[in-house]
Image (cartoon, rainbow, N blue to C red):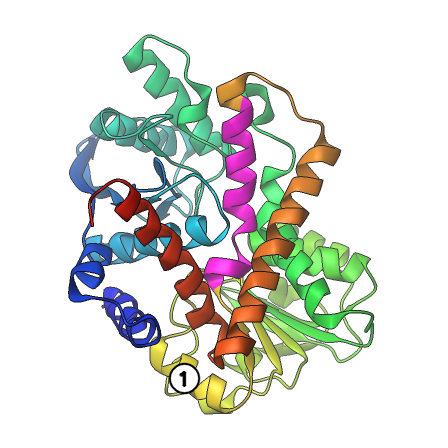
């Protein structure tokens, strides 16, 4: 169960923070759990929208389309969004949504019907000041465009800020597509300082993985391995990421590129300076954690390392930048889009990039300082900072 990772993590943090039982129970409770069965052309799909905590502001988090989606997973992801939003200093609580569906190969017309059906079921619980969705696994700006259109049809008004990650034509911002990777890349640059002779392996070549690999390659760093759901490739001399992307677009996989063929288990165990985890949850577990040879890991995916594996990596002196810090660039980009939509202002791209960089560097510096001061790993330090802010808001509201 994915939520076991949440409770295990909270147990660790509770010891460091000396949380009261009342505080711990509040953090394990949920503001709103909404569930529906979507009916699209006679086919049924289970769907959820869940808000974990709203003390800091409206819920905020993506919607994923995946056959493995479950209430347990969506609850876990919404909890992590609460931590992520709080850590970044954003005025959001944590929200998440999902549909249990296999979207690969599904016609666009069917995907549109599914997306509109989601809003028809959940339009009462989402909104600019309630809970603000965004793209996640196997959803994209077009998905958000359909959802916005359906929401506005139902409500009879324009409300572009009810959803983020939209097409530019509907109020999206140019930064949003690469913001998750861009935020992680700022942290990577903070970690390496002036070093250039750094090797990188990237597991997952979707939006975040591709953009991170591309940023690293264009900045002169050696990306020696990449993988997707069908496998991966390794070349000690590094890859031209433009070429990898072209091959992926043509053939549907990076495995058609030059280099030695490897699988998604082998890419995790390569001897590299940085391992970028940009695929799905639970990739590093207690079974393979001892085999990890990377010096540093950056989690661009949500929950790619289990709680038990986290302890093993820390004991082995492998630095892990946790998802709630490393991939927060995506929600920072969403926040900037939300602010633009709410205010009607139009921000220059240069300003958006500067804000993203400033927020990411500030968050990293605070976590880095606390993890060294308290002699805890970066994940625990991230949770401590985030939970302090959430509980502070709960106390200020008189709910604690």
Q: Residue at x 58, y 87 (%)?
A: 293
Toward the top, the furthest residue is 156
Judged left or right of residue 65, residue 298 is right
Determine if the magenta segment contains residue 329: yes
SS class of the residue under badge 1? helix
The quadrant holding residue 39 is top left
Q: Nearer the viewer, residue 19 or 380?
A: 19
Q: Position of residue 191 (x, y in %)?
A: 69, 70
Judged left or right of residue 198, residue 342 is left
The quadrant holding residue 386 is bottom left
Q: Position of residue 192 (x, y in %)?
A: 73, 71
Q: Residue at x 51, y 22 (%)?
A: 341
Q: Position of residue 197 (x, y in %)?
A: 82, 77
Q: Nearer the viewer, residue 182 or 352?
A: 352
Q: Position of residue 101 (x, y in %)?
A: 29, 47
> Can residue 298 be seen?
no
Above or below 162: residue 178: below
Which secondary structure type mostly characterizes the magenta part of the structure?
A: helix
Q: Which residue position is annotated with label 1?
A: 311
Q: Nearer the viewer, residue 38 or 276?
A: 276
Q: Which residues are magenta?
A: 323-340
């Amino acid at each position: 169960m994915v939520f076991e990772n949440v409770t295990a993590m909270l147990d660790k943090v509770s010891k460091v923070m000396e949380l009261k039982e009342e505080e711990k129970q509040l953090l394990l409770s949920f503001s709103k759990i909404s569930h529906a069965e979507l009916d699209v052309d006679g086919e049924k799909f289970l769907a959820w929208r869940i808000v974990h905590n709203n003390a800091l502001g409206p819920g905020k988090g993506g919607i994923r389309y995946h056959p493995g989606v479950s209430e347990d997973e969506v609850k876990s992801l919404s909890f992590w969004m609460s931590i992520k939003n709080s850590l970044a200093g954003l005025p959001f609580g944590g929200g998440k949504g999902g549909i249990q569906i296999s979207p690969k190969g599904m016609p666009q017309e069917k995907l549109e019907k599914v997306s509109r059906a989601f809003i028809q079921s959940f339009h009462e619980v989402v909104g600019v000041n309630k809970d603000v969705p965004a793209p996640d696994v196997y959803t994209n700006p077009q998905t958000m465009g359909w959802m916005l259109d359906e929401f506005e049809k139902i409500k009879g008004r324009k409300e572009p800020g009810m959803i983020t990650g939209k097409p530019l034509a509907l109020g999206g911002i140019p930064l949003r597509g690469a913001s998750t990777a861009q935020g992680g890349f700022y942290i990577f640059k903070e970690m390496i300082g002036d070093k250039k002779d750094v090797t990188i392996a990237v597991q997952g070549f979707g939006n975040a993985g591709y953009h991170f690999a591309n940023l690293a390659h264009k900045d002169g760093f050696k990306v020696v391995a990449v993988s997707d759901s069908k496998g991966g490739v390794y070349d000690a001399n590094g890859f031209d990421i433009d070429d990898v992307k072209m091959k992926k677009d043509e053939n549907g996989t990076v495995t058609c590129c030059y280099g030695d063929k490897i699988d998604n288990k082998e890419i995790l165990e390569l001897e590299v300076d940085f391992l970028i985890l940009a695929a799905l949850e639970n990739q590093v577990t207690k079974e393979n954690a001892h085999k990890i040879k990377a010096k540093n890991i950056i989690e661009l995916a949500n929950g790619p390392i289990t709680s038990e594996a986290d302890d093993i990596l820390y004991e082995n002196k492998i630095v892990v930048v946790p998802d709630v810090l490393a991939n927060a660039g995506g929600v920072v980009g969403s926040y900037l889009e939300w602010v633009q939509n709410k205010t009607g202002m139009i921000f220059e791209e240069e300003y958006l990039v500067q804000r993203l960089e400033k927020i990411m560097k500030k968050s990293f510096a605070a976590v880095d300082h606390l993890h060294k001061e308290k002699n805890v790993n970066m994940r625990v330090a991230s949770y401590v900072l985030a939970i302090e802010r959430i509980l502070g808001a709960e106390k200020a509201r008189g709910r604690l």
